[in-house]
Image (tube, rainbow, N blue to C red):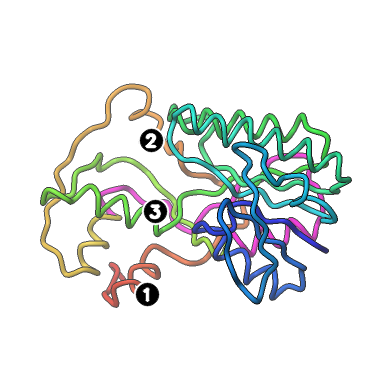
């Protein structure tokens, strides 16, 4: 099976490419800028403008759509919603048999501006001309790690201690995507999360232990609908199967500490 991977240079894309190759897929990797990798065929195209899309989808059996523009700006709408529509139309004209779109657990429950665009993109895929699958994943450990670094720039780690998260390793998401490509179009939405639901304060304690840090947690309760959704588990899922790589595993691999084990 020949698969086009959009957004192939991102965090998930860098995990997806070797996984697909190892599983026997022929991979065409897409990015907005030229890249050179002897192990993959790279093409230059931009879902945000449509440049190069017709050539990118030509001759592929499936499209794995990872490209996104996080935020809530006009550019996000241009890339995530209109760009997804451009891609779906081009793939339909090319006779592509399966479009897999990667989304985020909680896009239908958590009132982030960015999530509204992701949900709209899901709807574009479902209404489009290509048989489809949507895989919603929970947050990657590297994302949570970066969030904690940002939240502690001024000293204490600032955050709502009761917010719930369910980190899932991007390599396990990549493996699940390979399985979905092999299985064929679902015509629906699947959720995939990590093995543990953690409170923010639990994640912070493990993070501090792994880093040997004494920075305190400065609790700040997120207000309004957003805060209620995050504390109620809007970013988590009960779907099975789940990944097996834990937050503690990530911390051990990254920092060599105990990670709260």
Q: Mark 3 points at which residue?
A: 143
Q: Earlier in the sequence, mark 1 or mark 3?
A: 3
Q: Earlier in the sequence, mark 2 or mark 1?
A: 2
User: Badge 1 local density, few (<14 within 10 Å), some, or many (20+)?
Assistant: few
Looking at the image, which is closer to me, 112 or 73?
73
Does 29 sit above or below residue 95? below
The residue furthest right is: 95
Callout 2–callout 3 Cβ contact below 8 Å:
no
Circle 2: element type: helix
Question: Marks 2/1: CA distance?
Answer: 27 Å
Q: Is residue 5 magenta?
A: no
Q: Mark 1 points at which residue?
A: 253
Q: Mark 2 points at which residue?
A: 230
Q: Which of marks 2 and 1 is in front?
A: 1
Query: Which residue is depicted at the point 82% across and 52% down?
Result: 58
Q: Quadrant of residue 47?
A: top right
Q: Is residue 197 magenta?
A: yes
Question: Marks 2/3: CA distance?
Answer: 16 Å
Magenta-highlighted residues: 173-202
Q: Position of residue 240 (x, y in %)?
A: 62, 53
Query: Which residue is depicted at the point 32% across and 55% down?
Result: 146
Q: Position of residue 133 (x, y in %)?
A: 73, 44
Question: Marks 1/3: CA distance?
Answer: 15 Å
Q: Position of residue 22 (x, y in %)?
A: 69, 76
Q: Position of residue 217 (x, y in %)?
A: 16, 49
Circle 1: element type: helix
Q: Which of marks 2 and 3 is nearer the N terminus?
A: 3
Label annotation for residue 72: none
The residue furthest top is: 224
Callout 1–callout 3 Cβ contact below 8 Å:
no
């Amino acid at each position: 099976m020949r698969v086009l991977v959009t957004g192939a240079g991102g965090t998930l894309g860098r995990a997806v490419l070797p996984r697909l190759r190892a599983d026997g897929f022929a991979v065409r990797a897409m990015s907005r800028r030229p890249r050179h990798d002897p192990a993959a065929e790279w093409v230059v195209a931009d879902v945000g403008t449509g440049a190069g899309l017709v050539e990118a989808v030509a001759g592929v059996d499936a499209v794995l759509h990872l490209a996104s523009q996080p935020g809530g700006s006009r550019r996000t709408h241009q890339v995530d919603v209109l760009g997804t529509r451009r891609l779906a139309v081009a793939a339909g004209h090319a006779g592509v048999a399966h479009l897999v779109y990667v989304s985020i657990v909680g896009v239908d429950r958590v009132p982030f501006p960015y999530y509204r665009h992701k949900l709209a993109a899901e709807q574009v895929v479902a209404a489009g001309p290509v048989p489809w699958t949507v895989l919603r994943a929970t947050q990657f450990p590297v994302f949570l790690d970066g969030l904690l670094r940002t939240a502690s720039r001024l000293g204490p780690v600032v955050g709502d201690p009761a917010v719930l998260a369910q980190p899932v390793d991007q390599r396990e998401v990549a493996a699940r995507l390979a399985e979905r490509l092999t299985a064929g179009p679902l015509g629906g939405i699947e959720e995939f999360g990590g093995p543990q639901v953690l409170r923010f304060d639990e994640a912070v304690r493990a993070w501090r232990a792994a880093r040997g840090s004494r920075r305190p947690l400065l609790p700040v309760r997120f207000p309004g609908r957003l805060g209620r959704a995050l504390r109620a588990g809007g970013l988590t899922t009960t779907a099975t199967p789940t990944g097996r790589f834990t937050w503690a595993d990530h911390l051990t691999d990254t920092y060599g500490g105990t990670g709260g084990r």
